[in-house]
Image: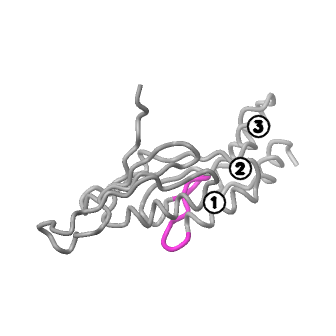
Amino acid sequence: MPRITPVLWFDGEAEAAATFYVSLFPGSRVTDVSRYPDDFPDPALAGQALVVEFELDGQGFQGLNGGPGHAPSDAVSFSVPVSDQPELDRLWDALVADGGEEGRCGWLTDRWGFSWQIVPSALGETLGGPDPEGAARAMAAMMGMGRLVVDDLRSAYAGT
C-alpha cells in the first residue's frame, strides 16, 4: 500500500527549502527534482523546479512550486521530537533564521511560512508525569515560553 505523502506549496522556492530541510535532519535527502521543460510556454519558468521530492528522517515529502495564492497556515505543523536542549536549540535557531518567527510554547514558523513544533522529551516527562501539581506547574511554565527550555520545565515540575 502506498504511503501518504504531504505536499508543501511554495511560490518558487521548493528546491531551496527542501535542500535546507534535509540539511537539518540526519538521514534525510532530496530524492528527485522535476523541472519545467525548456520549451515551457512561460519562459520565466523554463528549467525551474516544479516538484521536489525529499525525505526527512524517512518521511517522504513533495515541495510543489505552485505559485502565489496558497500560503501555509499553522493549522498544519511539523512536530519534531528532540532529546535535549542542544538539539532543540540547533533546530530552533536554524528554522527561525533568515525570516522565520518564534511562536509560543515551542512553536515557530520558518522563512517559508511553515509551522514547526520542536518538542523535547522533557515536555512529555513533565506534563505527563505522575505528580499532577508538578504537571500543572510545568504547563504554566511552558505557556510562558517561546523556545522551550528543558531545565526550566524540569524545575517547574519539581517546584524549585
Residue 79 is covered by the magenta coloring: no
Residue displayed at 38% across by 54% down: 63
Q: Amino acid at mark 3?
A: Glu
**On the image, numbered disc 2 is attached to which residue?**
141
**On the image, numbered disc 1 is attached to which residue?**
91
Q: Is residue 107 left or right of residue 114?
A: right
Q: Amino acid at mark 2?
A: Ala
SS at mark 3? helix
* 1 up-or-down from 57: above or below: above
Q: Coloring scheme of the render?
A: one colour
* Mark 3 in CB contact with mark 2 (< 8 angstroms): no
Q: Nearer the viewer, mark 3 or mark 1?
A: 1
* 17 up-or-down from 5: above or below: below
* Residue 99 drawn at (x, y percent): 48, 72
Disc ID at residue 125: 3
Number of other residues with Cα within 10 Å of mark 3, as a class: few under 14, some 14 to 19, many 20 or more: some
Residue displayed at 69% across by 46% down: 140
Q: Please provide the residue range marked out in magenta.
A: 97-108
Disc ID at residue 61: none
- Of pointers 3 and 2, the one earlier in the residue sequence: 3
Alpha-carbon distance for marks 2 and 1?
Answer: 21 Å
Q: Nearer the viewer, mark 2 or mark 1?
A: 1
SS at mark 1? helix
In the figure, residue 58 lies in which quadrant? top right
Q: Amino acid at mark 1?
A: Leu
SS at mark 2? helix
- Of pointers 2 and 1, the one earlier in the residue sequence: 1
In the figure, residue 85 lies in which quadrant? bottom right
Alpha-carbon distance for marks 3 and 1?
Answer: 21 Å
Q: Is residue 125 left or right of residue 107?
A: right
* Residue 94 drawn at (x, y percent): 60, 66
Front residue (pair 8, 71): 8
